[in-house]
Image: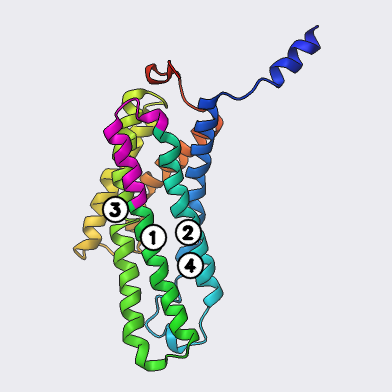
Amino acid sequence: MTNAKNTKMERAPMSSLRKTAMVAGIFYLLTFISIPTLGLYSSVRSPSYILGPGQDSQVILGAILEMIVALSGIGTAITLFPVVKRQNEGFAFGLVGSRILEASTMYVGIMSLLSIVALRQAGAGASALITGQALAAQYYWMFLFGQSFIPAVNAVLLGTLLYKSRLVPRILPVLGFIGATLLVTSWAGILFGILGQVTPTAGLFGLPIALWEFSLGIYLVVKGFKPSPITAGM
């Protein structure tokens, strides 16, 4: 009798909310696979990349990783939308919109770097140096206004929804608010030339926002949503 009861418990289907939380958490964790692009893109951003032998395969791999990150970012917002819209529909729509905008800037950046690769492969030569530098600069500014700023907007929107709904421990959205503040501070410093984009200081300022997203992903995968009034009727 006990074995039959245990078997029944083991085969109990996962609830819809639990699946939603797990999928959203997996999407959040997938957004961290683009970390190697810092090294993969180091050569293509060089002013003389078009004239050299090139490391095209590394750039293409980085582009694929960024593409996955862009789609995963949209996936986090779309997956969470049916739940968090019960707290505030406007903020929930804003989260979806900001994630789509972030992904769009990533795709434009990817196209900029792949265009440099295409020019090198076509043998454009020295006549394309200025074009290559312009494309590299476009990637820099897209990264600065996209991946270096919009995550702060995402953190404020989603952090507010999660803080008010109590779907996760409140320490997590608080970490998101802190991370958003530091990220915007770092972004402003880079924009006005006070900080370098790739420096230990800039990395330190960006660490809390990364910790917020990683911790949220882990929590959603392992624990799921906490009981909340907005999920009581679901």
Q: Is residue 124 left or right of residue 137?
A: right
Please check the rendered image and state whether residue 92 is part of the magenta-colored stretch, yes or no: yes
- Disc nearest the viewer among 3 and 2: 2
Please check the rendered image and state whether residue 94 is part of the magenta-colored stretch, yes or no: yes
Front residue of this view, candidates 153 and 205: 153
Q: CA distance from mark 4 to mark 1?
A: 17 Å
Residue occupied by mark 3: 149
**Mostly what secondary structure, the magenta segment?**
helix
Question: Which mark, by number, is residue 39?
Answer: 4
Q: Which residues are magenta?
A: 82-100
Q: CA distance from mark 2 to mark 1?
A: 8 Å
Element type at marker 2? Answer: helix
Contact? badges 3 and 4 (CB < 8 Å) = no
Classify residue 77 by image quadrant: top left
Q: First in sequence: mark 3 or mark 2?
A: 2
Classify residue 58 by image quadrant: bottom right
Q: Label 3 sits on what residue type?
A: Phe
Residue occupied by mark 2: 67
Query: Residue lying furthest top in this view?
Result: 1
Q: Label 1 sits on what residue type?
A: Met
Classify residue 42 by image quadrant: bottom left
Give percent across and percent down for residue 49. Answer: 43, 83
- Residue at the image point whose x is 71% and y is 20% from the top: 10
Q: First in sequence: mark 4 or mark 2?
A: 4
- Disc nearest the viewer among 4 and 1: 1
Q: Label 2 sits on what residue type?
A: Met
Q: First in sequence: mark 1 or mark 3?
A: 1
Q: CA distance from mark 4 to mark 2?
A: 16 Å
